[in-house]
Amino acid sequence: MVARVGTVAFQGIEVVDVDVQVRVGGGLPNFLVVGLPDKAVAESRERVRGALEAIGLALPSERIVVNLAPADLLKEGSHYDLPIAIALMAAVGVLPLDEAAGLVALGELSLDGRLSPVAGVLPAAIHAAASGRALVVPKAQGPEAAWAEGVEILAPDSLIGLVNHLKGDQVLTPPMPRVAEPAGALPDLKDIKGQESAKRALEIAAAGGHNLLMIGPPGSGKSMLAQRLPGLLPPLTPAEALEVSMLHSVAGQLKNGALLRRRPFRDPHHSASLPALVGGGQRARPGEISLAHQGVLFLDELPEFARGTLEALRQPVESGTVTVARAAAHVRYPARFQLVAAMNPCRCGHLDDAGLACNKAPRCALDYQGKISGPLFDRIDLHVEVPAVSAADLSLPPPAEDSAAVAARVAAARAIQVARFADLGRPELTSNAQADGTLLETIAEPDAAGRELLTRAAERLKLSARGYHRVLRVARTLADLEGGGPVTRLQVAEALTYRRIAPSRS
């Protein structure tokens, strides 16, 4: 007799059905797990054995075979513990076979029978809802699974609690969905004195979802400015919150089973490896760029990142997705992030200060900025210089305008963009940074004077086709900040000031 329980495997954020089959029969006593399990799955035998003994159920002295079908799909992770235990109890007659077959289960077992959290519960719950089966998850992740509509959620804290519920001896309370509580107030723009041009660029970046690069000496406030960008961005929409939370769930970073409502802000150290940044590793997990999906990826000390790591950003910045190809896995993750980078103008950081600059200036600036390829620079919409803050600026009172005032203007500009894209039949787009091709030409066509200025500037500055279109995007955002009218020469002129000018070779 074969007992069956459903569970899932993950390929990126895609969910694949896995059929856990258990047979207890004649032969020498043994406990085998087959179906291409990894080390964690193979070790589930001892966790399952210990958990069953903890609830007073000894395994029979017979041959136990666990098959994880399909057999050619690699099974990774500890979430197979619970479905194996349920199927095994059904096979020995503790639980009804038909009731076990109607379950989808995920959970790691402790040796005392308790259930521990695992990664991927939210996408598994949505998948279970589509298949019409009940879902069993650890109690700590019940609120996470509860966001899936139309599915029965069982969230016991232990294996014995699940057995008692299925036997009718007790009733598990359905979990309620939970939203993550804000972890304190976001940093406010009022904390920054001076740097008015950088604040203006930050507002434009927030309003249009544009990538931003800040270049300035150490201590000029580049990191402070970047940390205040999330406070200017609109909150996640329900659809965006679900998508972002699914990514964090697959990565095992969704705390307390609560849905995220703040846009992510990821700031990896410059020593981060290529798999850590773009995704990969043994299990092809999402990297920092995917965990920053619908949020901000802040790369401080940009030239200090490995060259290959930075070059790997070029395709995701354009497409909004990243494909991780490995011998054992080929998965795709969403990566629609807003890149904000900061760097010193040269290695010593004091290129424009003759009293502090090293004796290699200005050659050191060419060498240092040369670590960043031209194509990556070209993909950044806004380049802004952040000069050192003077003592006079530091002695001034705090600015009168705070993040809330700027965020209100950003929200109004974003609302204009969302309505415009909806009218054009592209409701999936939410910011000007996502517009491209014919759509961009439709929404950002400048007036005659603006077109003439842009043409002359493109020839003089030798703008690439990508740079040309990014100027149009920024100009469109500038017009939206002023009420959404047509793009004029004034907006084109300001957008051109944010294009990169290479350091002098003199």
Image (tube, rainbow, N blue to C red):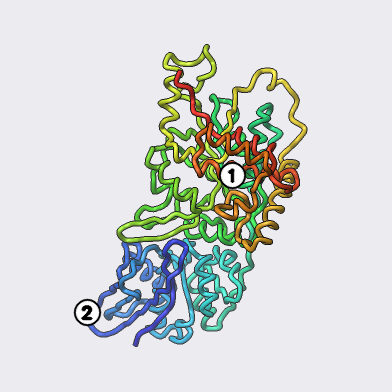
**Whether residue 185 can be seen here:** no
Label disc, if present, on residue 252 of the rendered structure: none
Relative to 128, 21 lies left or right: left
- Toward the viewer: 121 or 328? 328
Task: Give the residue number, with chain letter if any, for mark 1.
Answer: 210
| Mark 1 Cα-neighbour bin, 10 Å: few <14, some 14–19, many ≥20 | many
- Quarter of the picture containing the N terminus is bottom left
At 50% across and 35% down in the image, what residue appears?
A: 462
**Whether residue 93 can be seen here:** yes
From the viewer's perspective, is residue 249 above or below residue 350?
below
From the viewer's perspective, is residue 275 above or below residue 118?
above
Name the secondary structure under disc 2: loop
Q: Position of residue 296 (x, y in %)?
A: 56, 46
Name the secondary structure under disc 1: loop
Which amino acid, mark 1? His
Relative to 418, 215 lies left or right: left
| Quadrant in which residue 210 is drawn | top right
Task: Give the residue number, with chain letter if any, for mark 2.
Answer: 28
Which amino acid, mark 2? Leu
Q: Position of residue 390 (x, y in %)?
A: 65, 19
Q: Position of residue 90 (x, y in %)?
A: 41, 82
Camera-side mark, 2 or 1: 1
Relative to 166, 415 lies left or right: right
At 60% across and 76% down in the image, what residue appears?
A: 150
Q: Mark 2 or mark 1, which has the lower sequence index?
A: 2
At 31% across and 61% down in the image, what residue appears?
A: 328
At 53% across and 41% down in the image, what residue appears?
A: 467
From the viewer's perspective, is residue 144 above or below residue 296?
below
Q: Position of residue 376 (x, y in %)?
A: 46, 40
